[in-house]
């Protein structure tokens, strides 16, 4: 599977946090921090917006690095993505992503 596809099926290659990181774009970091703060009802600072990608070696946002239950589970199970997990269809953590993102679910099911 494409290494830029996260464990949950999201496309890290198109993630603005990754784009800000690889382009060292502080304006985009500020934009993403503001948006994510509003969406998650918590303070996220521009300094937190650094990520190479979920399954790629390198820097991660604090959430992706140590708080994401999907990433932690997949790493513990040593699976490439949740698409390889027999519990994918019943996983509540994964459902929180895929219920609103048909593309992520498609990527997991198709292995792309």
Image: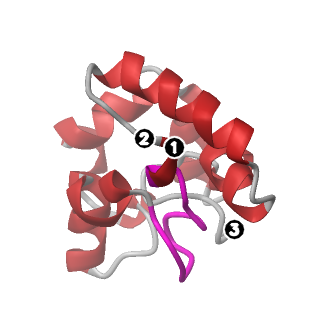
Q: Residue at x 75, y 63 (%)?
A: 22
Residue 15 lies in quadrant: top right
Q: Is residue 88 left or right of residue 28?
A: left
Q: Which residues are magenta?
A: 48-60
Residue at the right extreme of this rendering: 23
Q: Residue at x 30, y 33 (%)?
A: 95
Q: Nearer the viewer, residue 76 or 60?
A: 60
Q: Which residue is mark 3?
A: 2
Mark on residue 87?
A: none
Question: Is-magenta flag for residue 51?
Answer: yes
Q: Which residue is mark 1?
A: 46
Q: Nearer the viewer, residue 39 or 103?
A: 39
The C terminus is located in which quarter?
bottom right
Mark on residue 45?
A: 2
Label 2 vs label 3, nearer the camera:
2
CB-based contact (under 8 Å), mark 3 and mark 1: no
Q: Residue at x 51, y 22 (%)?
A: 35
Q: Is residue 86 visible in the rendered structure shown here?
A: yes
């Amino acid at each position: 599977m494409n290494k830029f596809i996260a464990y949950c099926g999201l496309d890290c290659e198109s993630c603005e946090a990754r784009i800000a990181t690889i382009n060292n774009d502080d304006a985009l970091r500020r934009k993403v921090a503001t948006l994510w703060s509003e969406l998650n009802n918590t303070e996220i600072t521009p300094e937190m917006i650094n990520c190479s990608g979920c399954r790629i070696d390198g820097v991660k946002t604090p959430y992706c690095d140590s708080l994401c239950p999907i990433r932690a589970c997949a790493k513990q199970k040593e699976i490439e993505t949740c698409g390889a997990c027999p519990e994918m269809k019943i996983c509540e953590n994964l459902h929180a992503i895929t219920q609103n993102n048909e593309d992520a679910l498609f990527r997991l099911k198709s292995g792309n």
